[in-house]
Image (cartoon, grey):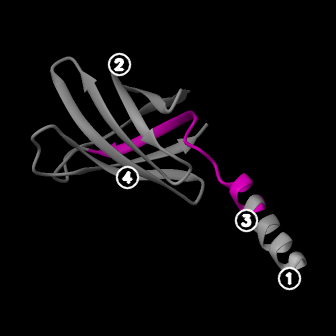
Amino acid sequence: MRALIAGCLAVILTGTAALADPVGKYTVAGTNPGGGSSYSGTVTVTKTGDTYKVTWNIAGTQYNGTGIGNDEFIAVSYTSGGNTGLALLSEQDDEWKGIWTYAGGTKIGTEVWTKK
């Protein structure tokens, strides 16, 4: 019984170590809400205590966000000038993929982060 428990614990710990958190530098590609135009740029995610600082640079405009999450998802509230919004991404096949919208929006856009 101890061997079985130790074996299960080893599998769990090994699997957990293999998972990636969202910290890093990425290229970003997305579409604006409602099937709008596409865009590309960069995004940087850094750990800030229990939260994440997320900074996008899209066509020379910087968007700053605060995220919460773990190695499976990240939810980010962001601002740029008078614009605010929300993004939700999950880790899939070595990329972070998700959806986003502006505050008060009724349509969603998509976004993919690919590690640099």
For discs 1 and 2, the disc positioned in front in the rendered view: 1
The local secondary structure at tag 4 comes to: strand
Task: Identify the mark nearer the N-term, 4 or 1.
Answer: 1
For badge 2, the amino acid type reads: Gly
Task: Identify the mark nearer the N-term, 1 or 2.
Answer: 1
Q: Identify which residue, 27 or 72, lies in the foreground.
A: 72
Task: Identify the mark nearer the N-term, 2 or 3.
Answer: 3
For badge 3, the amino acid type reads: Ile
Query: Which residue is at a point 78% across and 73% down the rendered structure image?
Result: 8
Q: Position of residue 29 (x, y in %)?
A: 40, 43
| C-alpha span from label 2 to label 3 | 43 Å
The local secondary structure at tag 1 comes to: loop
Question: Mark 3 sits on what residue?
Answer: 12
Q: Position of residue 42 (x, y in %)?
A: 46, 30
Q: Which label sits on residue 98? A: 4
For badge 1, the amino acid type reads: Met
Neighbor class of circle 2 (other Cα within 10 Å; few <14, some 14-19, many 20+) is: few
Q: Is residue 64 magenta?
A: no
For discs 4 and 2, the disc positioned in front in the rendered view: 4
Name which quarter of the figure residue 84 lies in: top left
The local secondary structure at tag 2 comes to: loop
| C-alpha span from label 1 to label 2 | 59 Å
Q: Is residue 16 magenta?
A: yes
For badge 4, the amino acid type reads: Gly
Q: Please report the bounds of the magenta region as a residue range.
A: 14-31
| C-alpha span from label 4 to label 3 | 26 Å
Number of residue marks: 4
Question: Mark 1 sits on what residue?
Answer: 1
Q: Identify which residue, 54 or 50, lies in the foreground.
A: 50
